[in-house]
Amino acid sequence: MIDCHFHLDESLVNADGLVASMDAHGISRTAVIAPLCPDIEKRLILTLAGPLLRRALISGSATFRKAVVRFYGNLVKPGGQVDVGGKRYPIIPQPDNEAVARAVAARPDRLWGWIFVNPAGPADPATTVSRFAREPGMIGVKAHPFWHAYPTDMLREAAEAARRHSMPMLVHLGPGAHGDFAMLAASFKEVPFVFAHAGVPYPDEVCAKARKKDNVYVDLSAASYVDRNIARKALALAGAEKCLFGSDGPYFHHHHGRYDYSERLALLDSLDLSSGDRERVTETNFMDILSSRQA
Ligand SMILES: [Zn+2]
């Protein structure tokens, strides 16, 4: 099994702790990402904002949905902060790819790494991708146009770099101009795009696009965003061949330096997937995405 989405926040779960957690839960590989916020405690998202957002996205009227997506968009504050249940956390302008590359190089048999880019930050995305694409096990490009507060249009240079290096991109979309997934997919047809958390905040639209477009996928990560209802809808709309298993760990379920995969594995079990579909979601879809790199 492959976890395609995990943040290597060493203050919560370090690389050894992650590998031990993977061993305990039968995860063979994890693709790790540098964290965007130091020491974020997302419990309030899980108990308040998450359920509201999921409810609006799955069953809300268009008006309710719009209002909740606007509320969600307002959680990112000017000056690079995110509001988590009334507490504000600084967003790191350029997440630390060096630490990820080091961890991946130390555990090449178990870890892969995403290269974090921020076109609104201090480091040039194309230079960042070229620099880290040389490192073993760095397999793709991660971008967060929502928390880093830039329009997806600014990702063109990063997407072009991903195309040059035959890498997929993992993108956490935001509302409005921060969420133009269709432009990315249409402009960079050779780049496989994995939209995080079932395509939040536009899961229906992104999953419908995934069904039609070869280069669009979604991950089913994060307890706050993807519950059983959202995951089932993503599978129905996108198809099992377009959904990837992921955790968004260590957030929500870390204890004493370990990440507890039980919640995400229980979610997976609750989806009634055929063994073929389960294998697609947990392994072969991601391997297919990466195989274009070697080809
Ligand atoms: Zn994440």
Image: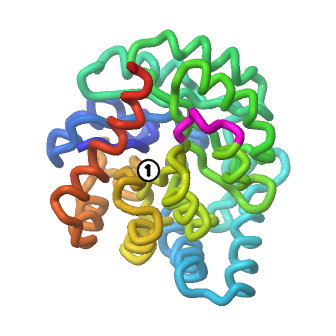
Q: Residue furthest right?
A: 78
Quadrant the N terminus occupies: top left
Q: Residue at x 25, y 58 (%)?
A: 277
- Residue 19: give x, y in percent of width and height: 24, 34
Quadrant the C terminus occupies: top left
Q: Residue at x 36, y 54 (%)?
A: 241
| Magenta stretch: dominant secondary structure | loop
Foreground pick, 89 / 279: 279
Horizontal side of residue 120 vs 233, given as left or right = right
Horizontal side of residue 215 vs 3, given as left or right = right
Residue 227 visible in image = no
> Does ligand 1 reach within 8 Å of label 1's beta carbon?
yes
- Residue 219: give x, y in percent of width and height: 44, 53
Q: Residue at x 73, y 43 (%)?
A: 148
The correct choice, above or below, for 7 with respect to 111 in the image is below
Which residue has dot 1 on it? 248
Residue 22 visible in image = yes
Foreground pick, 241 / 221: 241
Q: Is residue 188 magenta?
A: yes
Q: Is residue 127 magenta?
A: no
Horizontal side of residue 166 vs 145, given as left or right = left
Answer with the quarter of the image where residue 48 lies. bottom right
Q: Residue at x 61, y 19 (%)?
A: 164
- Residue 196: give x, y in percent of width and height: 52, 52
Residue type at mark 1: give it.
Asp
Answer with the quarter of the image where residue 232 lies. bottom left
Q: Which residues are magenta?
A: 187-192
